[in-house]
Image (cartoon, rainbow, N blue to C red):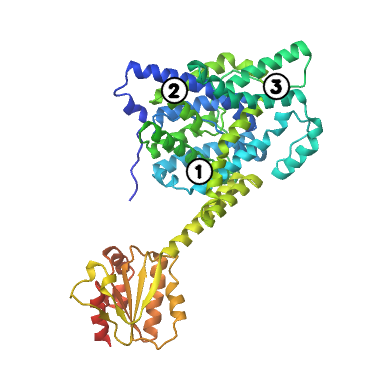
Amino acid sequence: MTPSLSFKPKLLSTMRNYDRRQFTTDLLAGIIVGIVALPLAIAFGIASGVTPEKGIITAIVAGLIVSVFGGSKVQIGGPTGAFIIIIYGIIQQYGFEGLTIATLMAGVFLIMFGVLHLGTIIKYIPYPIVVGFTSGIALTIFTTQIKDLFGLTMASVPSDFIEKWIAYFKSMPTIDAWSAAVGVGSVAVIALWPKVARFNHVLKKLPGSLIAIIVMTIAGLLLKQYMGVTTIETIGDRFSISNQLPGAQVPELSWEVIKGLVSPAITIAILGAIESLLSATVADGVIGDHHDSNTELIAQGMANLASPIFGGIPATGAIARTMTNINNGGRTPVAGIVHAAVLLLIFLFLMPLAQYIPMACLAGVLVIVSYNMSGWRSFMSILKNPKSDVIVLWVTFLLTVIFDLTIAIEVGLICACLLFMRRMAETTDVKVISEEINPEEEDSDFQMGNLEHLTIPEGVEVYEINGPYFFGAGNRFEEIMGALHHQRPKVRIIRMRKVPFVDSTGIHNLTNLCLMSQQEGIQVVLSGVNPSVQTVLHKAGFDKMLGVENICSHINIALERAKELL
C-alpha cells in the first residue's frame, strides 16, 4: 500500500490563534536568533571552502523555507558545522558546481524521505553512530582551524588528518603572535561571556561569538592603525565581499556528474535528516509539542533545493539556534521568518563591514563550535556500554576523522545493521524437548484437557522455536540436529507458538528441513502456529507439502497426530 502524502506545515496551524502578544515575543526572538546566526553563518561558509556571503545566503533562504513549510514550530534552519567537512571535500573534488548539484540531489532525497514516511525511521538510527560521526566532525573542524587560529605560514594545508597535524607541527615556528592572541582571545571571550553577562538581562541575550567578533575586529583595526600591525589576516584579505543578492541559477546537469555525486548527496540528505529531526525532537521536549517529522523532511528538502539555486550551501535544522529561539520566547514559525529577514537586512546594509573581521577570530568561534559539538560526555558514557556499541562508536568516529563522513556513515550503518541482526538472532533459540512437557511452563492456550504432563512418545522429537524465525535464526535446526546423536525419529514436531513472524529465509530453511525429513522418512508436524504465520506458510505451500492435518493449533493435538502417524 502506497503511503499517503503527509505535508502539514506548522505555520498554518499556529496562525489560527495568533495574536499581537505572540508576535511581539516572536519578533524579539527572531531578531536575537538572526544576530546569533550571523557570525556562525559567516564562519561555516568560510570553513566549508566558500565565500562568507554564501553562508549568510544559505541562512536566509533555508531559514525562511524551513520556517514557512516545516513541521516544527520553532525549528531554525541554516548552515551547520556538521556539513563543513563534506562540503569542503565535495568542492575539492567536484568544484562549487558539483556541490550545487549534490545539494539539489540531497534536496530531492529529503523530499522522498518525507513522502515515503521515513521520518520516524531515521530517528531510530543508533545513538553510537550519531555520537561517533558528530564527535569525529567536531575533531575535524577543530583540526581545520589551527592554521588560522595561530596565523601559521603554510604554502598549503594537507587534506589528510594525520598529514595535516604533521604539517602543523612543522610550521609551529611560523606562529604569528598577534593572530594567536586574537584567536585565543576570541575563545576566551566566547567562553567567559555567559558568566560576565549573566547579571544583565540585555547582555545575556547577546551571543558570545558576536561580542568576540566585535571586540577583536575593533582591536585588529586599532592595532593596524596605531601600532602598524599588519600580520592579522582578515576576511577582506582572503575574500572579495559582496552584498549583492545573487540571481537564481540552475547548473547544467550531466549523467556522469550525477552518478559520481550520488554517494555524497545521500550523505548530505541523511546527515540533514538526522540533525533536523534531532533538533526538532529536542525542541519538542522543551516546549511540550510534537513536530511532524515527515513534513519537516519535506521542508528540509525544499530548503536544499532552493539554497544552491541562489548560491547557497547545504542546510538543516540547527540545534543551537533553535534553542536560542526557544529560550527567547519564540513559539511559532514567525520567529524563524523574522530571523531570515534580519539576516537579509544585515546582508544588504552591513555586509561590507565583514571584510574587517580577523580570520583568527572566526577560527576561535569554530573552536568553540567544535567543542560544543563534540559531545565528549556522551562519547565517554557510551564507552561504558556493551562492546558492540563501543565498536560502532569507534569505527564511525575513526572513519570520520581519518577518511571522510560518507564512508563513516555507510560503514557505521552497516556495522549497526550487522550487530542488530546478531542481537535479533540471539533473541531466537531452538530447544529440544526430549521426554515430557510440563504444563506449568505453558500458556493458558495449552490447557485443553487438564493434563498434568504430556509424555512424548518414543519415536517422536519435539523442537520448540522461541522468537522470530528469520534469517538470523534460520540455521539453528541444522546446528541442533547436527549435535544430536541418537536414533532417527519417525515424527518431528516443531512448536511455533512463540514465533511472531517468519521471513523468506525462515520459510526457505523450514522448507528444506521438511523436505530433508521426508526424504529420511520422517513426518514433520507443526504445532501452535499463529494466524499471521499460518497465512505466510499457506502462501508458501506448506499445506500441500505437509498436509493440512499436520499443521496443528495446539501441542496436544500435534502429539495425538504423532501417535496416529506412529
Q: Which of marks 3 and 2 is in front?
A: 2
Q: Earlier in the sequence, mark 3 or mark 2?
A: 3
Identify residue for label 3: 234
Mark 3–mark 2 CB contact (< 8 Å): no
Image quarter hosting the C terminus:
bottom left
Specify whether residue 246 is in view.
Answer: no
Q: Position of residue 500 (x, y in %)?
A: 33, 63
Q: Nearer the viewer, mark 1 or mark 3?
A: 3
Identify residue for label 2: 328
Q: Label 1 to label 2, Cα distance in Å?
A: 30 Å
Badge 3: how crowded within 10 Å, few (<14), some, or many (20+)? many
Secondary structure at badge 2 equals loop
Mark 1–mark 3 CB contact (< 8 Å): no
Secondary structure at badge 3 equals loop
For badge 2, the amino acid type reads Asn
For badge 3, the amino acid type reads Thr
Q: Where is residue 356 in the image (x, y as percent from the top left)?
A: 67, 17
Secondary structure at badge 1 equals helix
Specify whether residue 342 is in view.
Answer: yes
Q: Label 3 to label 2, Cα distance in Å?
A: 32 Å
In this picture, is 500 found above or below 286? below
Q: Nearer the viewer, mark 1 or mark 2?
A: 2
Identify residue for label 1: 270
Q: Position of residue 249 (x, y in %)?
A: 55, 28
For badge 1, the amino acid type reads Ile
Q: Which residue lies furthest to the right in this view?
A: 173
Badge 1: how crowded within 10 Å, few (<14), some, or many (20+)? some
Badge 2: how crowded within 10 Å, few (<14), some, or many (20+)? some
Q: Earlier in the sequence, mark 1 or mark 3?
A: 3
Q: Label 1 to label 3, Cα distance in Å?
A: 35 Å
